[in-house]
Image (cartoon, rainbow, N blue to C red):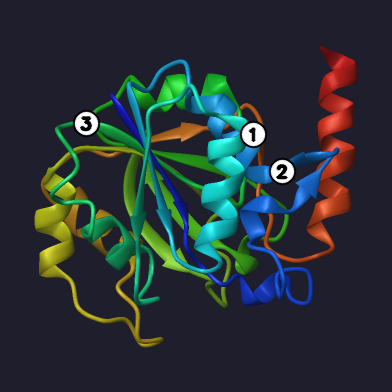
Amino acid sequence: MQAVILAAGKSTRTYPLTLTMPKPLLKIANKAILKYSLEAVKEMADEIIIIVGYKKDMIKDFVQKNYPELKIKFIEQKEQLGTGHAVSILKGHIKDRFVLLMGDNIYSKGDIREIAKHRYAILVKKVKNPESFGVVIEKNGILADIIEKPKKFVSDLVNCALYSLDREIFSALEAIKLSERGEYELTDALKYLSEEEKIYCVKTSFCLLISYPQDLPIAERELKKKQMET
């Protein structure tokens, strides 16, 4: 199975921290976020693909220096047209099934293994402030809808942006249009795919969603707490 890590965005929500460094290289508990991602997938993936863009050379240098033993391919997203666009440029590189994760969140190996048990799956997490995320609506454990930052409460489950997919996602991506913010949204393609296929909602055992600078110290505390528990 292949693993894909999206690490191309400018991450303007984490300014000023990301003015000089791409978000996946920000450190939490003295370790770059990208390192958590690579260590989480390296044992189950026979190839890792990293989508790069913003400050791509910094990411390439970091990976090549720290993981010379891994089979890693870099693909550049030359235009920042959204997560759906980032996945679409993979079409000529994906063989069949793959796991897809964001290079600026922290996931557990256990969650990645659980996700990979299904052909189609999305990792979800219960939060106290769902209005700040893409909210997931599920029925009997199957994805029914994803609503981006709803103004009214519809669910306390949010999208952790970790997926199990296969090449069918490319047909779904070809069917969607630009969103209101001028991007091709991967979640729109997932909703399209869910009309024909069952996409399982897997509840996370441990996932840290990092959107703003203030999320970094919170994530560090959560990591230290988890390490103490184990």
| Residue tagged 2 | 32
First in sequence, mark 2 or 3: give its number: 2
Q: Are marks 2 and 1 in contact (CB under 8 Å)?
A: yes
**Residue 42 appears at what percent x and percent y?**
48, 22
| Relative vertical location of residue 216 with respect to residue 208 in this rendering, above or below | below
Q: CA distance from mark 1 to mark 3?
A: 22 Å
Q: CA distance from mark 2 to mark 3?
A: 27 Å
First in sequence, mark 1 or 3: give its number: 1
Q: Residue at x 15, y 51 (%)?
A: 91
Binning the other alpha carbons within 10 Å of mark 1 as few (below 14), some (14 to 19) or many (20 upward) gives some
Mark 1 element type: helix
Examine the image and state in which quarter residue 155 appears.
bottom right
**Residue 64 appears at what percent x and percent y?**
53, 38
| Residue tagged 3 | 97
Binning the other alpha carbons within 10 Å of mark 2 as few (below 14), some (14 to 19) or many (20 upward) gives some
User: Which numbered dot is residue 36?
Assistant: 1
Q: Amino acid at mark 1?
A: Tyr
Q: Say whether residue 104 is left or right of residue 87.
A: right
**Residue 82 appears at what percent x and percent y?**
38, 71
| Relative vertical location of residue 174 with respect to residue 45 in this rendering, above or below | below
Binning the other alpha carbons within 10 Å of mark 3 as few (below 14), some (14 to 19) or many (20 upward) gives some
Mark 2 element type: strand
- Inspect this view and state whether residue 51 appears: yes
Query: Which mark's residue is nearer the viewer, 1 or 3?
Result: 1
The image quadrant where one finds the C terminus is top right
Mark 3 element type: loop
